Image (cartoon, grey):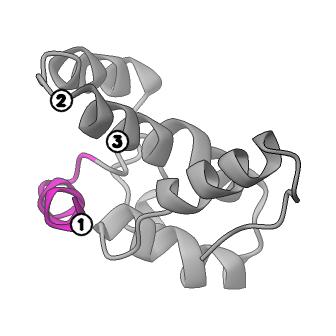
Amino acid sequence: MCQVFKKLGDAGFLGVNKPVEYGGQGLSYKYVMAIGEAIGAIRSTGVAMGIGVQTDCATPALARFGSDRLKEEFLVPAIKGDHVRSRHLLCSFIIGFVGRSFIFAE
């Protein structure tokens, strides 16, 4: 899965509407939707879901509200595909769902 994210990051698909100064393309959300439509054709729904969580759940708030330091530390690697943020969100959801804790799992 990490290889898929690295290839998507290298192609620029993980930061389509993210700020250019952090490795994104700075385009409007309509381009994200076009890529999302293509990703929807992937036969593995788990891969498609992981990509969607990475681009539309794990990074938007960080891109919009994060400090410069946080963006450099977390957003840049996420856009490059070097760090898969969606894994942490999914793990924390699962842990919270079973009633244990909402602490981010590593």
SS at badge 2: loop
> Magenta residues?
1-13
Q: Quick check: marks 2 and 3 in contact, CB under 8 Å?
A: no
Q: Foreground mark, 1 or 2?
A: 2
The one nearer the camera, 22 or 57, is 57
Q: Quadrant of the N terminus?
A: bottom left
Looking at the image, tell me whether mark 1 or mark 3 is earlier in sequence order. 1
11 falls in the magenta region: yes
Q: Quadrant of residue 92?
A: bottom right
Q: Which residue is mark 2?
A: 44
Q: Residue at x 69, y 85 (%)?
A: 69
Residue 87 seen? yes
Q: CA distance from mark 1 to mark 2?
A: 15 Å
The three-letter amino acid code for the residue at tag 2 is Ser
Q: Quadrant of residue 102?
A: bottom right
Q: Residue at x 14, y 66 (%)?
A: 3
In the rendered view, would you say 30 is above or below 66? Answer: above
In the rendered view, would you say 93 is above or below 79? Answer: above
7 falls in the magenta region: yes
Mark count: 3
Residue 59 seen? no
Q: CA distance from mark 2 to mark 3?
A: 11 Å
State whether the magenta stretch is mostly helix, strand or loop: helix
Q: Position of residue 12 (x, y in %)?
A: 21, 53
Q: Which label number is shown at residue 51?
A: 3
Q: Quick check: marks 1 and 2 in contact, CB under 8 Å?
A: no
